[in-house]
Image: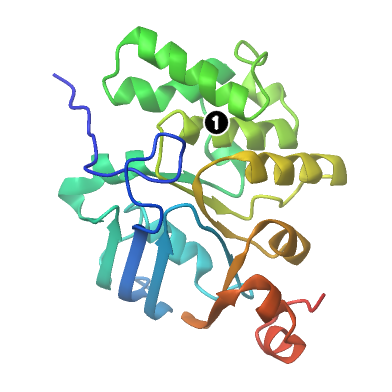
Amino acid sequence: MPIIYEPVVRCGDGWSRAAPDAPALEVEGLHFAYPDGHVALRGVSLQVRCGEKVALVGPNGAGKSTLLLHLNGLLNGGQGSVRVMGMPVTTSNLPFIRARVGLVFQNPDDQLFSPTVYEDVAFGPLHMGLPEDEVRRRVAQALAQVGMAHYADRLSYHLSMGEKKRVAIATVLSMHPDILVLDEPSAGLDPRARRGLINLLRSLPITMLASTHDMLMVRELFPRMVIMDEGRIVADGPTAELLAQPELLEAHGLEAL
């Protein structure tokens, strides 16, 4: 019989049971090297609390995507620890972890593989073993959250890039995650689709960590900013304060606004 994983605590998504400042994500001393010997993470430590919206910025090769892939166990084998809602990210805990961490890839075509939008969004809840009525309810809710309520029967590969990004977000929202993790969410979008995405992300009552080069979006949407470079976190603080330090930004390959 399928197992439905339910956490002890939840946070930041509108059905909260945890204290508002409880840690949703805890990374401690994370080191990681790829099989070819490239060292991607060098002792990364990071904590994200329930309800926070945090931007992860830095130049290409800084280790941002590698860090994101550790948050739900797509990468492992390094030194250090990662905990989600107090639960360690280990092989035995992956079904729980992957329901709690909604990871949205940079390219939505890596995430959308079913014939229709409905089937893509229903995939996660179905594999949680939820009853059909609950699956339908979650799909309808997730599509409504991203402004795609009338797209359930559409073919995913016929959608625009902006529409695909929204559906990709819906595929993880249907799992009722505690933290939404996004890799370059605004990449490849025209100005109208980018503005729509920013408004969507602002409206979602969920803990959020986004890796991005879009510094204008960071300034507008994320109160906290974490700068990575060469596999390390080199700065972590209020976005407004870090953006007011052009020397810091330029030293780590970032555009000063």
State the residue lying farthest toward the right: 191
At a point 25% along the width and 41% down the height, the residue shown is 96
Side of 14 where 30 appears, left or right? left
Q: Is residue 95 above or below residue 41?
A: above
Q: Position of residue 8 (x, y in %)?
A: 21, 43
Q: Position of residue 211 (x, y in %)?
A: 58, 61
How many other residues sit within 10 Å of disc 1, few (<14), some (14-19) or many (≥20)? many
At a point 50% along the width and 44% down the height, the residue shown is 206
State the residue lying farthest toward the front: 19
* Residue 217: quarter of image: bottom right
* Residue 148: quarter of image: top right
Front position in the image: 178 or 110:
178
* Residue 84: quarter of image: bottom left
Does residue 166 appear in this view? yes
Front position in the image: 162 or 235:
235
The amino acid on which the numbered mark 1 sits, given as a three-letter code, is Ala
Side of 5 where 168 appears, left or right? right
Q: Is residue 20 above or below residue 3?
A: below
* Residue carrying label 1: 170
